[in-house]
Amino acid sequence: MNDTAVQATERTAVLDVLNDVYRAWADNDADALVASYIEESTSILPGSLSDGREAVRARFAAGFAGPLKGSSVLDEPLTVRFPSPDTAIVVSRSGVLLAGQTEPNRWVLATWVLTRGVTGWAIASYHNCEE
């Protein structure tokens, strides 16, 4: 397999991880959402740091029990880069659809850092800011 085919395969595998996250979000399942995060992951949202997979899970569990109940996400990957064979950086544009919405109130730009381990790709870090 040539480098282009390998990179296309890896790109698909990385985006599959993000798709799993968004399927879990649509199910409002915090446990399934963080299954793709490494134990030492970080998630930064405006004004908020979740340090570690359990902190990310707790934040989403609280959100799904409250203002994010019934929500889903529209996500548009903009770039996928591989600075090393076992590291991927994804930049995406995302918007949360609250229950009953067909368009998000706002869009964010997000950076995802994924690492490849023995079980495949996993999220090491996430950060977003308003578009």
Image: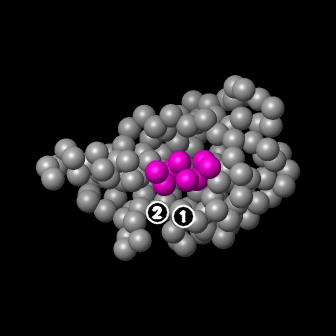
The residue tagged 1 is: 37
Amino acid at dot 2: Ala
Q: Residue 50: within the magenta?
A: no
Residue 18 is left or right of residue 115, and the answer is right
Residue 8 is left or right of residue 119, and the answer is left
Q: Viewer-proximal residue, 92 or 9?
A: 9
* Residue count near mark 2 (Cα–Cα under 10 Å), binned few <14, some 14–19, many ≥20: many
What separation in Å lies between label 1 and label 2 (alpha carbons)?
5 Å
Q: Is residue 130 visible?
A: no
Residues at discs 1 and 2 in contact (Cβ within 8 Å): yes
Residue 122 is left or right of residue 67, and the answer is left
Q: Viewer-proximal residue, 94 or 126?
A: 94
Q: Is residue 41 visible?
A: yes
Image position of 110 with respect to 51: above or below: above
The residue located at (66%, 70%) in the rendering is 54
Q: Position of residue 22 (x, y in %)?
A: 60, 48
Q: Which residues are magenta?
A: 16-23
The residue located at (85%, 50%) in the rendering is 66
The residue tagged 2 is: 122
Image position of 34 with respect to 90: above or below: below
Q: Position of residue 107 (x, y in %)?
A: 62, 31
SS for dot 2? strand
In the image, farthest residue toward the top: 103
Q: Viewer-proximal residue, 3 or 131?
A: 3
